Amino acid sequence: MRKLKAMQIKDRFLSNQVVNSTLRYSTLAPLIDSLMNELGIQGGDIKGLTQCLKPQSTSVK
C-alpha cells in the first residue's frame, strides 16, 4: 500500500514538472527567439541554426 502511494505521489510530481517546464518554455520562447534573431541565428529549423556557421563569401572585385 505504501509503495502504491509513493508511486502516485511520484507520478503527480512528474506531471507537475512536465506542465511547469512546458509553461516555462512557452513563456521564455519569445525572448529567446528575439535574442537569437539579434545574433543572426534563425531558430526555426536546423538550417537556420547552422546558417551563421557558414563562412561569408567576401568577393573582392
Image (tube, grey):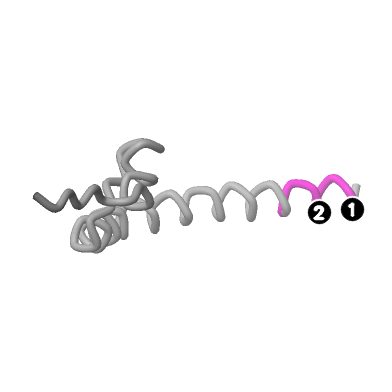
Residue 10 drawn in magenta: no
Residue at point 35%, 47% (across, down)? 54
Residue 4 drawn in magenta: yes
Q: Which residue is mark 1?
A: 2
Q: x%, y% of residue 10?
A: 73, 53
Callout 1 crowding tier (Cα within 10 Å): few <14, some 14–19, many ≥20 = few
* Magenta residue span: 2-9
> Are the residues at dot 2 and dot 1 in contact (C-beta closer than 8 Å)?
yes
In the structure shown, which secondary structural element does the residue marked by tag 1 occupy? Answer: helix
In this image, 53 relative to 42: left or right? right
Q: Most extreme residue toward the front, as rendered? A: 61
Mark 2: which amino acid? Ala
Q: Which residue is mark 2?
A: 6
Taking depth in this image into account, of 61 and 53 the one nearest to the observer is 61
Q: Most extreme residue toward the left, as rendered? A: 61
Q: x%, y% of residue 45?
A: 36, 36
Taking depth in this image into account, of 36 and 47 the one nearest to the observer is 47
Quarter of the figure with residue 4: top right
**Vertical comparison of 17 with 42: above or below:** below
Q: Which SS type dominates the magenta stretch? A: helix
Residue at point 31%, 60% (across, down)? 28
Mark 1: which amino acid? Arg
Q: x%, y% of residue 6?
A: 81, 54
Callout 2 crowding tier (Cα within 10 Å): few <14, some 14–19, many ≥20 = few
Residue at point 90%, 47% (across, down)? 1
Residue at point 38%, 52% (across, down)? 53
Quarter of the figure with residue 33: bottom left
In the structure shown, which secondary structural element does the residue marked by tag 2 occupy? Answer: helix
**Marks 2, 1: nearer the viewer:** 2
